[in-house]
Amino acid sequence: MLNVGDKAPDFNLMSDEGEEVHLRDFAGKNVILYFYPKDDTPGCTKEACSFRDENDAFARRRAVILGVSLDDVQSHQSFKEKYGLPFTLLSDPDAAVSKAYDAYKQKNMYGRKFWGIERTTFIIGPDGRVKAVFPKVRVDGHHEEVLAALT
């Protein structure tokens, strides 16, 4: 698990716009890097929409929001358009970045074990170091705790 003060792993992922995105592209800014299980599911939609609704508050704190899931670019495009998400969604189809950030875990649902993304958020500072980690995120009120950690 990455800890506060650790250098955040750089990455190279495809965005919902079909462009390569690297963490280093955001040097000098705070980055809210949130990992979520699946596009257009109830919890993930609620989380994305809460970040959407507070996008201006994040921007005032010089923060960029990046959502990461295993979904493909086309799924991200549909999800982003459907809910008017103003931030970038990144596709991590082989879970390489999710693993690097220790957000890819074995899960257990209804007695069935499988691997997938555990809802996790990182705040990465302008210097590329982890400023805060929110593991096992509960969606309700999460955007507020992330905003509070930026002040």
Image (cartoon, rainbow, N blue to C red):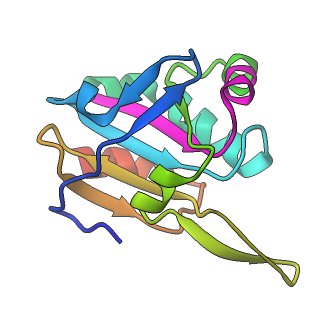
Image-quadrant location for residue 7: bottom left
Residue 14 position, x and y percent, is: 52, 28
Q: Is residue 11 left or right of residue 137?
A: left
Image-quadrant location for residue 118: bottom right
Q: Is residue 61 visible?
A: no
Residue 18 position, x and y percent, is: 56, 17
Q: Residue at x 73, y 23 (%)?
A: 74
Q: In this rendering, is residue 57 above or below 124?
A: above
Is 130 contained in the magenta span?
no
Residue 126 position, x and y percent, is: 15, 37
Q: Which residues are magenta?
A: 63-78
Is 67 contained in the magenta span?
yes
Q: Is residue 55 left or right of residue 130?
A: right
Question: Which residue appears farthest toward the bottom when viewing the image?
Answer: 111
Quadrant of the image for the C terminus? top left
Q: In this rendering, is residue 76 above or below 131?
A: above
Residue 132 position, x and y percent, is: 28, 58
Q: Is residue 120 visible?
A: yes
Q: Is residue 17 left or right of residue 23?
A: right
Q: Nearer the viewer, residue 35 or 20?
A: 20
Q: In this rendering, is residue 118 above or below 110?
A: above
Q: Nearer the viewer, residue 46 or 112?
A: 112
Q: Residue at x 69, y 40 (%)?
A: 71
Q: Residue at x 46, y 67 (%)?
A: 135
